[in-house]
Image (cartoon, rainbow, N blue to C red):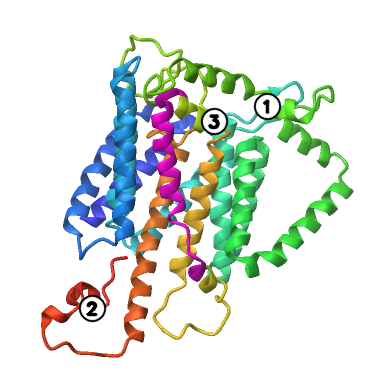
Amino acid sequence: MTVATLLSLFFYIATLALALTWYGADLMNLRWLALSFVLLTSAFCWAFSRQGKLYQREKNDNMLVLVYLILTFMSVIVAENALFSGLRWVSHGMVIFTLLVLLKNSLTTEHAARILLFLKAVIFTLLLVSWLKPLMPGVKVGPDLVVYAGAFGSSNALGQVAAVGAVLYLHGCLTDKARWMRLAQGGMSCLAVWLMWAAGSRSALMAFLTSLVLMYYFYPRLVHGKVVLVVLLVTALMIAFSWVPGKIQQVVLRSSNPVQNVSEQLLVTRKSVWEASWAGFQKRPLLGWGFGATSGIPKDWKVELKALGTIQRDAINDTLFVLEGTGVVGLVAYALLVVFTLRQMPTKKERRLLGRIHSPPFRFGAFDFSIYHLHAVAFILAVSLLLMVQFDNTALSAGNFVSVTLWLCVTLAGTACSKVRGVELLNQRRKQPARRPLFRSQMSPDAANPWISSGQVRG
């Protein structure tokens, strides 16, 4: 059943990636079919892979997801267009429940590693096609700025996917054991960074920089020297090529107009949308206009399964988008998902283990540091993308590749968390002196569970 679950998940990810490009414009309905397969197979996988009891922290995580779904559904009941908001809520709820509950509580770290590898392969294909066979080589977004869209429908989509790829490949370049793999992923990271820069996506650039900061936080020894090298290289380029600072200004500010100040230029494409969202929230502050909707949504809507979107305003700030669509109640629910994400952070003890990668082997010889590499990169990407959607895109779409990637990374980090707790529990058991109870009733619940006492910890 696990094989079927992984295959259906891979199919869903592939359809989302295809829908981002002009090549997949006629195949967008496949996303909903694939999502249904993922939900069905993951439910069976969860039912048949239950081993032992969940940790208390995992139970709390499940409760956060349940409360989130209940609170956001309240906005559907009072929605201006209940059909549209209902379909948006159902599709998003399927993704959240499938990834954050079913898969998170049934996958092992071996499965999580395969999912991450598949995600790398999909992004590699997208970037390679955009580089070799772009259908939209140039898009003019300003009076003197042309950005690159490649095979994607928009330059922002290319930039955000490239940012995810750059983080994944850079992390592999730092942590992979095989030298040829480090070199290959280093080259792919350079290509991804170049495409991200050519796309001119400021939100993607911000997500990438956030990932670098978090990567330095988790890998100070591995990143420190390389950061110095990159800073020296960028400084040398600015000195050698005088046009580089001007190009940076054009990409970041989307203009080279010296009349406006920096803050005005940065907000030129966002201020009006934020003001409109705030005005819509003030009209219906408690439960909003309906999940995924804005104040301008029509009451009558023809069902279009190709894309569940009839709103006329881009979601370039997820907090305001949630506030307008679901009100204060929905904002509280969204905060629960943020808390859920942050709860998957590697602990201080785990970060100390990360810092000992090049030290003598850990005294428990079977200990595998790759678990912590998986944990770190999944958490880094989840937090970076969650911050990115406050400036562009949304985390509430079931048909958006970046949105699903965000929650998929939260799932992978949660899977690694479960393994971490299991390993720590076994280590604590080894440190305790052997003591055989006279009666089974005297044994602790964990020791009485043969699944834990035999060392077969979930994950």
Q: Which element is circle 3 on?
A: loop
Q: Quadrant of residue 92?
A: top left
112 lies above or below 269: below
**Amino acid type, mark 1:** Leu
Q: Position of residue 108 (x, y in %)?
A: 32, 62
416 lies above or below 62: below
Q: Is residue 55 left or right of residue 326?
A: left
**Amino acid type, mark 2:** Ser
Q: Main secondary structure of the magenta part?
A: helix
Q: Which element is circle 1 on?
A: loop
Q: Is residue 51 left or right of residue 329?
A: left
Q: Which residue is mark 2?
A: 453
261 lies above or below 282: below
Residue at x 26% of width, y 61% of height:
54
Span of residues in magenta:
324-350
Residue at x 17% of width, y 76% of height:
448
- Residue 317's tag is 3
Q: Quadrant of the N terminus?
A: bottom left
Per the model, the C-alpha gap separating discs 1 and 2 is 57 Å
- Residue 267's tag is 1
Residue at x 18% of width, y 73% of height:
449
**Sequence-wise, which precedes: disc 1 or disc 2?**
1
**Amino acid type, mark 3:** Asn
Residue at x 64% of width, y 66% of height:
220
Per the model, the C-alpha gap separating discs 3 and 1 is 12 Å
Residue nearest the observer in this picture, 374 or 118: 374
Residue nearest the observer in this picture, 192 or 352: 352
